[in-house]
Image (cartoon, rainbow, N blue to C red):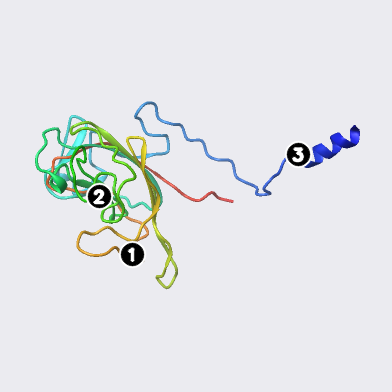
Amino acid sequence: MLIAVTGLYAQSREWKSGVNWPEPKIVTPGEGVAPPSDAIVLFDGKSLDAWKGADGWVVKDGYASPTKGDIATKQEFSDCQLHIEFATPEAVKGDGQGRGNSGVFLCGEFEVQVLDSYENKTYFDGQCGGIYKQRPPLVNACRKPGEWQSYDIIFHAPQFHDDGELKRPATITVLQNNVLVQDHLELLGDTPYVRAPRYNPEVTKGPIKLQNHGNPVKFRNIWIRELGAPQI
């Protein structure tokens, strides 16, 4: 009996990786819609001081909306977790790409499309939650026009070898209204309208950009967390 127990213990001993991991830092989650303690607040409903081009946008009742031009953060980011809330116009005007159109750009050139895609048909890789001209959303998770929606985006910037060749493509995960719509997608490059995607080896870091596409889309509660690999 003792032999059997000893043998069983030998087979069930704890496995350890052998890596001497540092202790993870403490991050306090925000209460309700508040950001976590280590987040950089990009828009708190009061000021667009963190953005360039803000003179063409209006801040009112806790939200920001475009009247002229795009806005881009003064600070540049690489790998990140981004939270942003938006609402397309309650009064429905136009259709397809002309209805509640805007966009959220990572590194200034990788676009997650913003569009009123509630009962509004357009090309699938151009609808809300899509990576523009590259991949439709997994599902259409849009709320009705005028209702507040959210994106939670995990983005990893591309990496390049010293000779400029692509080492690792950019990847993106997107939850829209807490529903997964992009699942660790490897991007083909940037997201232009007029040509095929391509990578620029000089772009491994850049601003968050919000697009003015001529529609009064509202934005609020924007914050970001910079991500990095664990330190061993």
Given the image, on which type of amino acid does mark 1 rest?
Tyr
Q: Is residue 74 left or right of residue 201?
A: left
Residue 12 numbered tag: 3
Q: Is residue 4 visible?
A: yes
Q: Indicate the position of residue 199 as horizontal and vertical percent values.
A: 33, 64
**SS under mark 1:** loop
Q: Nearer the viewer, mark 3 or mark 2?
A: 2
Q: Using the numbered discs, state the Cα–Cα distance from disc 3 to disc 2 in whole angstroms.
A: 51 Å
Q: Nearer the viewer, mark 1 or mark 3?
A: 3
The one nearer the camera, 211 or 93, is: 93
Residue at (47%, 50%) from the top-left corner? 228
Instruction: Give the mark nearest the N terminus, 3 or 2.
Output: 3
The reply to whether discs 1 and 3 touch (Cβ–Cβ < 8 Å) is no
- List the residue tagged with mark 2: 124
Residue 199 numbered tag: 1
Residue at (80%, 37%) from the top-left corner? 9
Instruction: Give the mark nearest the N terminus, 1 or 3.
Output: 3
Which image quarter: residue 215?
A: top left
Q: Indicate the position of residue 108 as horizontal and vertical percent values.
A: 28, 55
Instruction: Give the mark nearest the N terminus, 2 or 1.
Output: 2
